[in-house]
Image (tube, rainbow, N blue to C red):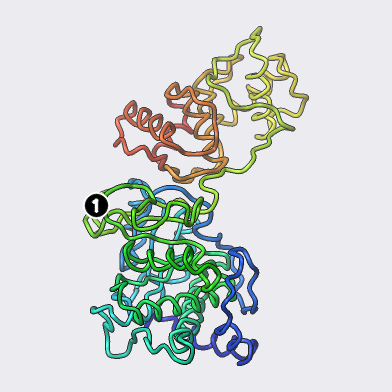
Amino acid sequence: MPSNQPAARAFVRRLTAAAGTLALSAALLTTTAPAASSAPAVATVAKKTTNPVTPGNFKGYGFDQCLAPTQQKMDAWLNHSPYLAVGIYISGDSRACRSQPNLTPRWVSTQLSKGWRLLPIALGPQASCQERFPRYKDDFTINPTPGKGGRYPKARTQGAREAEKNAADAEALGLRHGSTLWYDLEGFTLTNKHCRESALAFVSAWVNRIHQLGYVSGMYSGASSGIKMVDDARVERPGKFKLPKNIWIARWDGKANTSTDYIRNDGWRPGGRMKQYLGGHDERYGNVTINIDTNFLDLGKGNHPGTERRCNGIRTSFTSYPAIKPGTTYKGRVQALQCALKEQGHYPWRMHGKYNKRTQKAVAAWQRAHGLRTSTTFSQSHWVRLHSHGARPVLKVGSASNAVRRLQRALVAAGVSKDVATGVYDQKTKKAVKAYQKRRKMTRNGNAHPVVWRYLASGVR
C-alpha cells in the first residue's frame, strides 16, 4: 500500500462516524442515476488546498506511466514534450506500482503549479474473470455472487468501500474536490454474465460513492470490455446504474482522437472522453526517456482561456505591431501601447490613442526601466518586450490563458505570426513558436519554454 495508508484509514473512520451505517446502506442500494453535476450527498473532511481542480477543462495530449516520474524527468518533459497531462497511480491494492517513492503531496502540488494536468488513477478489485488478477496475496477480485434479486450486493459493497479508500488517498495527496478520479478496470471477458454484471454493480457503487465524497468519476477500461459494458448499460438499461461522468478508452489504434467503433458516437460527448491510443513504448524528450502510454483528452469545455478585459475594454490584439513614431496615426496601436504602459505603471493619463508628448514621456520611462536607450520611437523590438512582460509559464498545445495571449501578441510583434491573440495555444501558435525557435537556432518543439520566453522578454525578433 502507499505510504499515506494511515491517513486513509483515519479518514475512513471519520467518514463512517459522520455518515452512519444507515446512510452507507442507502447509498449502496439506490438504483437511480444522479445528474453528473449533483452535489455530494455526504460531506467529507476535506483538506484545505490551493491546488486547482484537475484535469478540469482540457483538450490535448497526455501520457501515463505506472511509476510517477522524478521531478527532473517531469521538468524535462514539461519543457520539451508535447504532453500537458499525466496519469498517476495513486491508490488501489491491485496496482503494479504499489510503491511510489516520488508521489507525495509536494510532488502533486508542484506539478499542478507548473501547469501539468494530473489524471489520478485507482486500480483496486478487478473483474472476477480477469485472468491476471488477483496480482498479490492480499488483493481481491470483484465478488461475482448475484445474491438476492441478482443485484450483486457484495460487489456493490466492495465498490463503495474502494471509493472511500481512493478518495482518502486522493485527499492525502492534496487532490482537490471536483477533480476526476479514474478507476482502472482492466479488460475482461464481456460475455461472462456474472463477471460482467458484478463488475457493473461494482462500478455503479464506486461512482455513487465517489460523487458523494466530492470527486468526479472517471473509468478507464478496454474499448471492447469495460467501456462497452457501461455504454450498453447507458443505452439498454437507462437509469439502472450510476455511470461514470467521464470515460478513458483503451484502444491502441494509433489515432489521436476519442473515437472507437465499440461504442455509440453520442456517449460521453461533448467533453467526457479521453483515449489511450498507443500502448507501452519509449519516448525521449529533453534527453530523458520514459516508457509511456499515449492519450488524447477532450474533457469538460475543452480549452477556454476565459475573458480578458484590459483598460476598460481597449483592444490590444492586432495582426501587426509597427514602430510608433511622433506623428503616427496608428490610433488603435497607440491605445494598446498606452494601456500596457498604464498597466506597468508608466502612463497615468487617458488612453486617447494619440502619440503625444505625455505618451512619449511614458515610453522613455519604460525604456529606462528596462535599461534601454531612450528614444521617441517605440520599435517593433520594444513591442516584443512589452507584450512578453509578466509570468513565464511553459505553454504548449492545450494551454489556454492570458499568458497565451501575451505570447501570441509577442509572436506577432516578432514577425512570426499574423494571427490575432485568442488565448488558446493551437496548432497555429505552435507553428509560430517553431518559426521563432528556428530563427534563434533552438530545438523546434513548438513549446514556449523558459528559453523562448527569455528571448522574447529581451525584445529579440
Q: Nearer the viewer, residue 402 or 323?
A: 402
Percent across and percent down for residue 398 are 45, 45
Percent across and percent down for residue 56 are 53, 56
Q: Residue at x 60, y 69 (%)?
A: 34
Percent across and percent down for residue 305 are 57, 43
Q: Nearer the viewer, residue 315 or 357?
A: 315
Looking at the image, residue 53 lies above or below residue 61: below
Q: Is residue 120 visible?
A: no
Percent across and percent down for residue 353 are 71, 18
The N terminus appears in which quarter of the rendering?
Answer: bottom left
Callout 1: SS: strand
Q: Which residue is mark 1?
A: 283
Looking at the image, residue 111 lies above or below residue 81: below
Q: Residues within 10 Å of mark 1 (few under 14, many from 20)?
A: some
Q: Residue at x 55, y 62 (%)?
A: 51
Q: Residue at x 35, y 66 (%)?
A: 221
Q: Nearer the viewer, residue 356 or 392?
A: 392
Residue 363 horizontal side relative to residue 449, left or right: right
Within the image, what quadrant is residue 389 found in?
A: top right
Looking at the image, residue 157 lies above or below residue 325: below
Looking at the image, residue 322 lies above or below residue 51: above
The C terminus appears in which quarter of the rendering?
Answer: top left
The residue at the far right in this view is: 350
Residue 21 horizontal side relative to residue 263, left or right: right
Residue 71 horizontal side relative to residue 112, left or right: left
